[in-house]
Image (cartoon, helix red, strand yellow):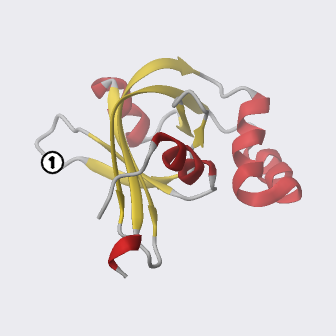
Amino acid sequence: MKAFSEQQRQSFLADPRVGVLSVATSDGRPPASAPIWYDYTADGTILVSTGAKSRKARLIEQAGAFTLTVQREEPPYQYVTVEGTVVDTTSPVPDDVQLAIAVRYLGEQGGQAFVEQMRGVENVLYTVRPDRWITADFSDEI
């Protein structure tokens, strides 16, 4: 196993993969984890959007941080994990950001339809500053 270079990490995160977001709980339960779409910028900023009244949003607000793991699910296995601090919260999610994330995963037509379907749903956008990166590339072990 080897770690990704910064360039490899950026390239990996640029692909539209579903991430798994984990956030601490304060009620004695294990961390909450859920699949989520994300966006990533070259400076390392992570953007995630979720329902404003969801448990996930409430926990993110309480913790002020979360972990996001993005993986390649077929061999050669690879993953990127980022532990980060929430540096901005925006509600509702700006239309252009919501559309960009939806188009990233669903294409132009599907993204437009998704945004239209979500109109009127309360949502929130979290901007996360990476505090720590963990990466793994198992391609040399195949």
Quarter placement of the N terminus = bottom left
Between residue 49 and residue 45, name the one nearer to us.
Answer: 45
Between residue 126 and residue 57, name the one nearer to us.
Answer: 126
Q: Residue furthest front?
A: 140
Classify mark 1: residues with Cα within 10 Å, few (<14), some (14-19) or many (20+): few
Q: Is residue 87 above or below residue 20?
A: above
Q: Residue furthest right?
A: 109
Estimate the x, y position of residue 93 in percent, counting from the top left.
66, 28
Q: Amino acid at mark 1?
A: Arg
Residue in the picture at 83% in, 46% down: 116
User: Pointer 1: what residue?
Assistant: 29
Estimate the x, y position of residue 55 in percent, counting from the top left.
38, 41
**How many numbered markers are drawn?**
1
- Viewed as shown, does residue 37 lie left or right of 109? left
Estimate the x, y position of residue 86 in percent, counting from the top left.
41, 23
Estimate the x, y position of residue 82 in percent, counting from the top left.
37, 40
Residue in the picture at 73% in, 45% down: 118
Quarter placement of the C terminus = bottom left
Q: Residue furthest bottom?
A: 142
**Which quadrant of the structure image shows residue 10?**
top right
Q: Residue furthest left?
A: 28
Task: Report helix, strand or loop for mark 1.
Answer: loop
Residue in the picture at 63% in, 56% down: 16
Q: Is residue 92 above or below residue 81?
A: above
Residue in the picture at 60% in, 22% down: 91
Between residue 136 and residue 107, name the one nearer to us.
Answer: 136
- Viewed as shown, does residue 36 lie left or right of 115? left
Q: Is residue 118 above or below residue 53?
A: below
